[in-house]
Amino acid sequence: MKKMTFTFLFASLAMISVYGQTGTKLEVGMKAPEWTFPDADKKEFTMNSWPGKVLQINYVDPDESDMNDPFNDAIDKAADVDKIINKDFFKGFGIVDTKSTWKPNGLIRMIAGKKAKKYDTTILFDYDGKLLKEWGLPKDSYSVVIVDKNRVVRALYTGKIPETENEKIIQLIIELTKE
């Protein structure tokens, strides 16, 4: 009996330490907790900076910044070339997890500036790894979160998005922009 009690107590403490450090793990169907981050000019943004828009939030470790370029190229093409994603109701942007890298912030801002120009978008900076903890996102990775106009998570991808998923995500974005 003592052995079972000790095992249960140990497992409970382990669960508390894992979940206590990360906050709420973001999941599809839940409302995404709000945040505030600056861009390179120190202008602060929140999700409400783009009211009424479906958001594609790319949360990126700078060491993995090119991981989902094929996915972002497909989204960019769908919005700017094919015009099947209505940009009046959609905004894709990046948040850089600067805490997860050895790279200095000046270099990170330079790399981010090139991405912002390439995709004609906004890049924000999470200097303390806030979303990593609060949303329970994986470290040293690239996460893509799609939230609807009410900020409910509709899709969540971590790591490299297979090119076979691109069309599915584009269709989801199109549907969400019409709601």
Image (cartoon, rainbow, N blue to C red):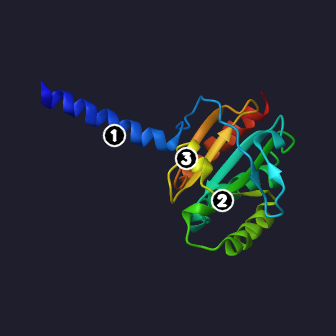
The correct choice, above or below, for 109 with respect to 120 in the image is below
Secondary structure, mark 1, is helix
Cα–Cα span, label 1 and label 3: 17 Å
Density class for disc 2 (Cα within 10 Å; few <14, some 14-19, many ≥20) is: some
The outermost residue toward the top is 1
Query: Which one is earlier in the sequence, the residue at label 3 or at label 2?
Result: 2
Residue that carries the numbered disc 3 in the rendered image? 133
Residue 153 in sight here: yes
Query: Which one is earlier in the sequence, the residue at label 2 or at label 1?
Result: 1
- Frontmost residue, 169 versus 28: 28
Type of amino acid under label 3: Lys
Secondary structure, mark 2, is loop
Type of amino acid under label 1: Ala
Residue under the image location 37 percent in, 37 percent down: 15
Residue under the image location 70 percent in, 43 percent down: 35
Cα–Cα span, label 2 and label 1: 28 Å
Residue under the image location 67 percent in, 31 percent down: 152
Label annotation for residue 127: 2
The reply to whether discs 2 and 1 touch (Cβ–Cβ < 8 Å) is: no
- Frontmost residue, 26 versus 162: 26
Pick the quarter of the image with the C terminus.
Answer: top right
Residue 67 in sight here: no
- Frontmost residue, 142 versus 163: 142
Type of amino acid under label 2: Tyr
Q: Position of residue 4 (x, y in %)?
A: 16, 28
Q: Position of residue 118 (x, y in %)?
A: 77, 66
Residue that carries the numbered disc 1 in the rendered image? 14
Q: Position of residue 26 (x, y in %)?
A: 56, 37
Query: Which one is earlier in the sequence, the residue at label 1 or at label 3?
Result: 1
